[in-house]
Image: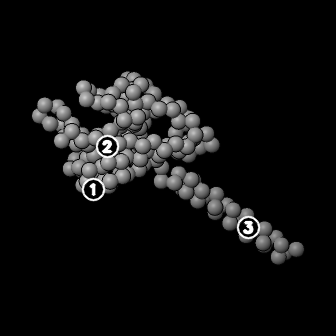
Amino acid sequence: MKGRTVFFTAIAALAASLTVLAPAQAGEGCDGARTATSVKLTVVVNAVRSSAGEVAITLYPNDRRRFLAKGGKLARERVNAAASVRACFWVPPGAYAVAVYHDANGNRDFDRTLVGLPAEGFGFSNDPETKIGLPTLSAAQFKVAADLVKPIRMKYLK
């Protein structure tokens, strides 16, 4: 009987230690907290021109006033630049938009030319047309109902 008690105590201790480790592993390196109702949004940025600097991947809520506004982001991940990069976020189901830029010089700022055009690569969810200005929220918006991989193609003007 005593051996059986020791066995079950050891199993209970092992289960408790795994429970303590679970939250750290549950996030799988994604931004945000994984909950029973959250879904995993993975953003994959393709066509990054060089491995210099980093790529900033910014997640916005479904709110026109916050889209591309200073302080309007829900989350941002910065990853080392490569031809293709990815970042993931735990989010509740809903509508979101993503903006990305290639911070090639690593100054953590989206650089522009003297006439105000982008000097660094950029992109938005749904790859909307951006020849005459920034896209609207509705052009970049997408719905997340279950785990989703959202590709974005980096664009360069020069």
Amino acid bearing label 2: Met
Tell me the element at label 1. Answer: loop
Amino acid bearing label 3: Ile
Task: Give the class, few, some or many, for how many residues have Cα within 10 Å of label 2's Cα (few <14, many ≥20).
Answer: many
Residue at the image point whose x is 26% and y is 50% from the top: 49
- The relative height of residue 38 versus residue 28 in the rendered view (above or below) is above
Amino acid bearing label 1: Ser
Task: Look at mark 2 in the image and give the residue it sits on.
Answer: 154
Which quarter of the figure has residue 125? Answer: top left
- The relative height of residue 93 versus residue 89 in the rendered view (above or below) is above
Closer-to-camera residue (128/37): 128
Task: Look at mark 1 in the image and give the residue it sits on.
Answer: 51
Q: Name the mark nearer the viewer: 1 or 3.
A: 1
- The relative height of residue 57 versus residue 65 in the rendered view (above or below) is below
CA gap, disc 3 to disc 2? 50 Å
Q: Which mark is residue 11?
A: 3
CA gap, disc 2 to disc 1? 13 Å
Counting residues from the start of the chain, the first of labels 1 and 3 encountered is 3
